[in-house]
Every structure is written in C-alpha cells, then in structure tokens.
Amino acid sequence: MKALRVLLVALAALAVDVLASGHAQTLLLTLDAPSPQAGAYFGGSLAVGEVDGDGLADIAVGASSEDVGGAEKQGRVYVFSGLDGSLLFTLDSPNPQAWAAFGCSVAVGDVDADGTGDVAVGAYGQDVASNIGQGRVYIFSGANGSLLFALDTPNPQSVAVFGHSVAVGDVDGDGREDVAVGAPGEGAGGRAYVFSGLDGSILFALASPNPQALFGFSLTVGDTDGDGLADIAVTALENVGGNAEQGRVYVFSGATGSLLFALDTPNPQVGAYFGHSSAAVGDVNGDGKGDIAVGAHGEDVGGNQYQGRVYAFSGADGSLLLTLDTPNSQASAVFGYWVAVGDVNGDGKGDIAVGAHREDVGGNESQGRVHVFSGADGSLLLTMDSPNPQARGTFGTPVAVGDVNGDGREDVAVGAPQEGMGGRAYVFSLAPTNQPPQCSAAAPSITEIWPPNHKMVDVNILGVTDPDGDPVSIVTTGMTQDESVNGRGDGDTAPDGAGVGTDAARVRAERAGTVDVPGDGRMYHIHFAASDDKGGTCSGIVKVGVPNDQRPEHVVVDGGELYDSTVP
C-alpha cells in the first residue's frame, strides 16, 4: 500500500504541480461539497450532461481525495441538478478502499439507452485481486444512481492506473454511448480501451505506435472523420524528435480502431507536455467534423517558461486551425492544462474554453483563470475569474461544457479543487453582453416645418440603431420649445405638442411674431427614449424648427428649452 500511495502522490504532482520543478460571465451555479473536507479535491474532475431527464445538462463532480467511511482518499462523486444546483445523488465505490481515487475521472453519456445520461467514474487507485493500483471504472445509472456494470482492464497488472481517464461516445453505432478508458501505467508506455455500452465487452485495445510513456493519461471522443461514429483521441507524454516529454496526440477511428493521424505541436520543445493532460473534440470550423483542441501547458512562450499554449487542429486532415495564447502573459501559468470545446456564443461553431489554473490574479498566486476563445477566429470572448478569489485556488482545473440553463448555448463548468474547504465548482453562462440601442445618430423625420398654418405635424424619430440587431422601440417622453405656448402672433392654439408616451411626436406649425415685429423662429425639442427587447436603453433629443419666413438668412435661433409644449 505504501508503494501505491507513492504512485498516487506522484501522479497528483504530475497532474497539478508538474511545473513546480463583448461577452460577460453570468454565474449560474456555485457547487460546494455536500460533505466539506480539507484536501478532498472536490472539483478536480467534472462532466456535464443530462442525467435527470429535464432537458437541462447536469453536473457530475469528482472529489477523488475525499475520505469515506474511514477509508483515506477513497473518493466520491456528486451529481448536481443543472436546474437549481441541488444534489441529485452521491456515488460511492462499490468496493470501498483507501487511496482508490474514485472520482479521479468522470464522464456522462447515455450508456443504457434509456434516454438519460449515465455516469462513468474512474478509480485508478483501485486494487483488483492482488494487483495494487490496477484501477477500475464503474458505470452508474443516471436514472437512480445504481451500478450498471464495472470495467476492468483486459490486461491485469499492478499500477496500471486503469481509469485515470474516461470518456463516452457512440463508437459502434448502436445508439448507446460506449466507454473509452485510459490506462497510462499499463504495459510498455500505456494503453487505452473502448468498451461497449451494451454489455461492457471490449471493442478496441489501443496502444501508441511509439510506445514510450503515459499513453492514455487523457483521452476524448468525437466524430472527427464524419462517418457518424465517435473516434478516439489519446494523449501520450512521448519524446518527439529528441525532445523529451514533448508529447503527442493520436486519433483513432471509432469504426475500425485504426490510426487516423497523429498530432504534434507546431512549436517543438522539450517538456511541452503537448496533449498530456487534456484534449477535446468539437466542430470548431463548422465543416461538420469534430476538430481537436490540444493543450501544451508546458510550452515556453515569449520567454515565459511553462506559460502554455493551445492548438486547434482540423478533424478532417489534422491541419492547424488556430493557435491560442493567454491574454495575460505569465511564466508558469500552465495555460492549456485543461481544454473543452462547445458552442458557447451560439454561432454554430465550437468555441474553446482553456484553463490556466496557475495564473496569478490580482496579487493572488495561482488563483487561476479560464479563457474562452471563439472557434470562428480564435478571438478572446471572455476571461473568467473565480467568484471567490483565493491564492492557490487552482480555478480552471478542470473545465467542461454543456447547456445547463437551456438557452441553446453551451455553458462552462469550472473546477477549483483547492478553493475553500476542499474545493468548489462553478457553472457560468457566457451570455453575450447586450449592447443597448445607439441614440447618437438620431434625427427627426422633418427638420423644418413650413408653412406656419397652426396645424399639428407628425414627427418620427429616425436613425436609432442597435449594435446587436435587436428590435428597437421608441417612445416620446416630452416636448419643449423656446417660445411661450400662446405668444404674440402664434394663433393662441395651445397646446403646441402632443404624443408623449407614443412612438411619434406631434408639434404645431407656428411661431411667434408679426409683420411689424418678426420673431426669430421657434425650436421644438423632442425628448425620446429607445429600448431593445433585452433591457438596453438610450435616450436623446431631436430638434424641429419653424422659421419666421423662408429667407435663407433667417434661420431658426434656438433659444433653449423654456416652455413645455404640451401645456394647454
């Protein structure tokens, strides 16, 4: 058992401390451990998917170091409602054991084809028979939390850490989500497996074409080749071209298990950790095929050691689509340690959420941040900060996406496993910031009224625009003028203005003055307010003049807002 503890501590150090050697975020949910416990690492793993059948994605949160029933660091998983954050159920290992790391990895998908997502849980420290740390994966029903089945490696051995990573997707096309499992400690450099969701039978055994180290440390699934079947992307901490621990990602066909292509960093470097901890599949470029986002959290950028980078590659041919850098240049930020892909801004293309859990924020060392980039052009959509600022909170470990609030956009779930008492998790909506209507270019439909026949004239407000293209409503809020309502020579026809509260103003075609004592014209000031359907507003004033006569030199002189035009 002591050897296993050393292994688990080493893996944790590799996972977290390897580097010691026009939108707004709306917080939807704050998730705290139902059983707060120091060092539980609640939020160290996350998965988002619908579990309870209400049409909203729910959130599975792992606490892989939680002590359970006296078993040190046995681990636990909690499943929360996306609707209100309430606890749906708690998952415990069917085989209680200290240092099992149950919950080190989680995934949600409909394995039993009952229409609701089930929960796959990795326990890479689980002893199996006499093999210490062989690892195991458990599949629980999303309907009631009962155990559906357990998965064991087809190649039993100690320290296989089978279950270090799990992912789900329909690989064989039977309508059920199948389960991909990484075993980075197995054999000569690690293995990965794909199991049938129907009966748990093995579909594929995958190994690196260049067996070296930690193949299967992380993996993800998605249809990259457009054949309708989920393919499997597997990471490996391999030496590449003489660069130790540069890292590589292999993409395998879900149809045959054959290698589709391998991905390397466009910036070769020792210790880049390219793909080591995280890769994600989603359609970034809108071609209908899943593209692959890969983090390289150990890459040096602009002289900053271990700042990290993220790359997005085409699922069609493996070509480079995007290179992403943190907007906050910093050494040891480990930008790219976690990545997730989903359509966050609603443009039909997968956007990329990137965790940088060692980024310093406001003087707090390693508070962590999450940056969300547009899949369309790689531009930064939003930077997310923890609602509970704290040094070494490691906000951004990990990130996951799913539509929690039912608005048709993917929301972003973020773990902060060292925040507070044993960790937290959050869910944010990346709702676009509503830009209010713009009133600066507003103009009246008529600027000068003639002849002064004392009749009411309709005036509409033109030129109000909305940057988001939202429909705009305009309401007249008041009218003033620079002459008295019943002045000399104006016909005594008060009131001179009407239409307050409507979408158009009405002003009277008249001005003061006589033939013997001409005036300098009348200026109406029409006040209005504009609003869009999302609560954005602006207001303004337009002016309409009635000249004394039509001689060019006799322009209307604006004497100011002296009288209320609507007074009888």
Image (cartoon, rainbow, N blue to C red):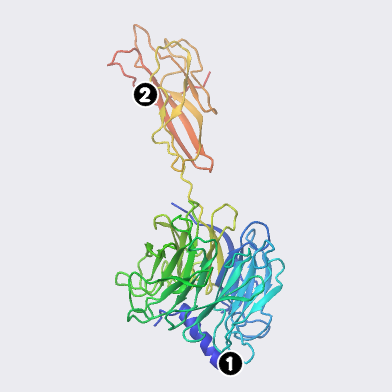
The residue lying at 62 percent from left, 72 percent from top is: 196
The residue lying at 66 percent from left, 81 percent from top is: 68
Q: Amino acid at mark 2?
A: Gly
Mark 1 nearby-residue class (10 Å; few <14, some 14–19, many ≥20) = few
Is 78 on the left or on the right of 393, as rendered?
right
Is 171 on the left or on the right of 555, as rendered?
right
Would residue 274 be seen by someone viewing this image from the given angle?
A: no
Of marks 2 and 1, which one's residue comes earlier in the chain? Answer: 1
Farthest residue toward the left? Answer: 553
Please tell me which residue lies in front, 119 or 74. Answer: 119
Q: Amino acid at mark 1?
A: Met
User: Disc 2 to disc 1, how far (Cα)?
Assistant: 91 Å
Q: Which label sits on residue 559?
A: 2
Q: Which corner quadrant of the image does residue 203 belong to?
A: bottom right
Q: Which label sits on residue 358?
A: none
Kindly state the secondary structure of the residue where label 1 is placed: loop
Please tell me which residue lies in front, 559 or 460. Answer: 460
What residue would you read off at disc 1?
1
Farthest residue toward the top? Answer: 516
Report the quarter where the N terminus lies: bottom right
Please tell me which residue lies in front, 154 or 83. Answer: 154
- Whether 52 is drawn above or below 509: the answer is below
Label pair 2/1, CB-CB below 8 angstroms: no
Please tell me which residue lies in front, 460 or 338. Answer: 338
Mark 2 nearby-residue class (10 Å; few <14, some 14–19, many ≥20) = some
Residue 568 image offset from top left, x and y in percent: 53, 18
Residue 463 image offset from top left, x and y in percent: 41, 32
